[in-house]
Image (cartoon, rainbow, N blue to C red):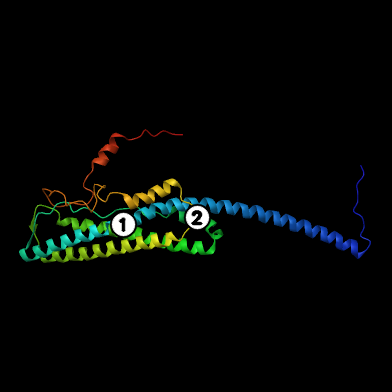
Amino acid sequence: MDIHKPKPVRNWREFLTEIGTIVIGVLIALAAEQAVEALHWRAQVAEAREVIATELAGNLRNSIFRMRTERCTERRLDMLAQILDTAAHSGALPPVGDIGLPSLFQWTSGAWDGVVASQTATHFPRQQLAELATIYGFVHKADSFNLAEANIWAELHTMVGPGRRLDPPDEARLRAALSLARYDNRTLTILGLRIVQRMEKQDMPFSKDDLDLIAAGKHRVLTANRYSICLPVGAVPAAYGQAPLTDLSEIDDGLKRLPDFVAR
């Protein structure tokens, strides 16, 4: 078997030619590798933007609906404040029916958190990355305030019942709850507004389903939800110890339609 041995370099010109050939080969290989990596990250960023767009469509729906129901919540709190003022003078709460509950939404950020954890976010355009981080900062705050608000309205539901004596400690507790409920309502509304304002400047790849979800926030009837704060006050219950989300028929329906889970 003949083995072709490398030719000896006879002068500097041949030596530099050999070195140049090697360097060019290495540069071509590196450029090809970088091109493949760039295409990979471009595809990853495009996919991530689609997932984030769908998640933010839900948060936009929440924001818009929250802004639309803000006045309903304020009017309900005005009514409760008037009831409490009258009760403070008479010493007794009158019969109070179901007072409802402001919009209880799930403000989601799992898609964004996953993109950040996977390092894909570092390949976003710098300005868009900063804007999305700000928007999700508002989303995280909204989720926190929404939970706090639900707890405060559970406190306000202690007014719901057939009528009872009102002592000074109870009055003080309810007045504090009213103030916190107003603060939560206004804060959530402002956070929703900020999310809408920031998202208006983002060129996100919303799907038709995403746009339909956003449109639902704009056009959904304010009294469509059985727990809506925009509904009239409900019937007076026979006893105290009430809480929000009084209609449990959905749970009964769910129990009748439990799926059969199987191993795969």
- Mark 2, residue position: 115
Q: Name the N-terminal-most of marks 1 and 2.
A: 1
Q: Would residue 18 appear left or right of 242 to someone viewing this image?
A: right
Q: Position of residue 79 (x, y in %)?
A: 16, 60
Please tell me which residue is depicted at 60% across the width and 52% down the height of the picture: 40
Disc 2 is placed on an element classified as: helix
User: Which part of the image, by quadrant, shows the N terminus?
Assistant: top right
Near-viewer residue (248 or 241): 248
Q: Would residue 260 appear left or right of 28 to someone viewing this image?
A: left
Amino acid marked by disc 2? Val
Q: Would residue 241 appear left or right of 105 to someone viewing this image?
A: left
Q: Position of residue 261 (x, y in %)?
A: 39, 34
Q: Would residue 119 appear left or right of 61 to someone viewing this image?
A: right
Q: Which mark is residue 5?
A: none
- Mark 1, residue position: 66
Contact, mark 1 vs mark 2 (Cβ under 8 Å) = no
Disc 1 is placed on an element classified as: helix
Amino acid marked by disc 1? Arg
Q: Position of residue 108 (x, y in %)?
A: 39, 54
